[in-house]
Image (cartoon, rainbow, N blue to C red):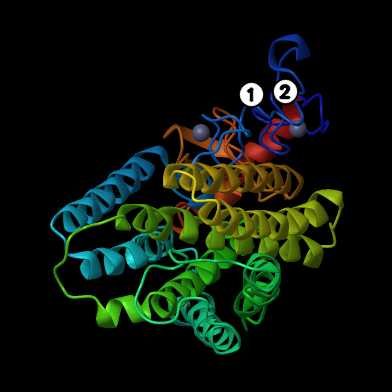
Amino acid sequence: MRCDHCSNDVPDGVFCTRCGAHQGTAAEIGDAKKREHRYAAHPNEHVVQPSVFTTLFPHLGQHKIHEFRWAFAAGLAGILILYIAGLITAAILVATFLVPVLYLIYLYEAQVYRDEPATVLGFTIGGGAVVGLVLTLIERAVYNPYPGVGNPLRNAGIGAGTLLFIGLLVPIVQEALKPLPAILLPNRADFPETVDGLVFGIAAGLGFSVAESLVGFSSALTSLPAHMTPGNWIYDLATLAVFQPLLQGSATGMVVAAIWRYRRGSLAGREIGGVAMAVIAHVAFALGTLLLKDAQVNPLFVLVWQAGVVGALLIYIRYLLHHALLEEAAHMGFAETICPNCHMHIVASGFCPNCGMALTAAPASVKRARKPRTDTATKARGKT
Ligand SMILES: [Zn+2]
Ligand SMILES: [Zn+2]
């Protein structure tokens, strides 16, 4: 059949395998070319959906996504148990490492780094941790808002200087420096896709988050007794385990994805907006947290605020990646493969003709298993 949108001759399917457009009448599916009801990395979801795992772990199929959700839930349950048992130090450590360790497993699972795990992991997670360590130590030397033992910001009596430093300067400097390890990746030319840039940026941001949290809670980790009454730590633990790593990872992921887009020569308003969104979200997160804690509102509101900021960031990432995947649909040659999303046996180029998944977001193992089928291409061309 001939696609109405890119005019290529493609095998029959619900989606065009070359440009990803949804075939059919505009009335029932909206804008077929943009297909915002079918997120290109996970076609079962809408683009506007603040889902953590399908956004930040774009190479995972439905089944694997569920495993990661369960592992994350189990980790959170573990933290809660440690908290109730009064083992705050252990809970802080588990909370610090939960999301970054899941991401490390994901990187192995999807083999995003292809044949060079050491270089890629070193320059993303490792590099991010080094930047995080150096930067957080400098921040501390310049300004230590929490002298002695304690919970960050618990005893905050904040002035304008603190607000500008913690709420504005630190987030901006962090967003400027966190992408560096991913940008300096020596073999970056082997990873041209925007989805690669996104994943590398998230990894660097999570490496940064680990170092930042360890330095930030170093006084608590070294001075708290191993066992104590739980107190109000649960709110800080929630920030530490969930919202802080998600913010640091998503913001850097978006910045690096925009840089990857720039390298491909497609820098537009959407990408500049992405960088602006990352910085604004980080400032909103830090400043909002500071002001809300200072106003001594219910700590639950602080978490709601943090969740809102992270959710908005996730949606922007999906918007950016969705359009990047659709625009970057290079003709990869028709090949036989099994779609990692719908598990149909397909003959496809850039998109699964059945569910519309962008195959550039497939795990490396699926890409390697592609069997070129030139005859299909010729057949399709002959059919018109
Ligand atoms: Zn098409
Ligand atoms: Zn499919």
The C terminus lies in which quarter of the figure? top right
Q: In the rendered image of this protein, does residue 135 appear above or below residue 254?
A: below
Q: Residue at 45% across / 66% down in the picture?
A: 155
Secondary element type, mark 1: loop
Disc 1: which residue: 12
Q: Residue at 17% across / 60% down in the picture?
A: 229
Corner quadrant of residue 96? bottom left
Q: Is residue 383 left or right of residue 146?
A: right
Q: CA distance from mark 2 to mark 1?
A: 6 Å
The N terminus lies in which quarter of the figure? top right
Instruction: Looking at the image, tell me whether mark 2 or mark 1 is earlier in sequence order.
Output: 2
Near mark 1 (Cα within 10 A), the count class, few <14, some 14-19 or many ≥20, is: some
Corner quadrant of residue 334? top right
Q: Is residue 357 visible?
A: yes
Q: In the rendered image of this protein, does residue 50 appear above or below residue 231?
A: above
Three-letter amino acid code at the position of disc 1: Asp
Secondary element type, mark 2: loop
Corner quadrant of residue 231? bottom left
Instruction: Identify the mark at residue 1; answer none if there is no mark.
Output: 2
Q: In the rendered image of this protein, does residue 69 appear above or below residue 9?
A: below
Total marks shown come to: 2
Three-letter amino acid code at the position of disc 2: Met
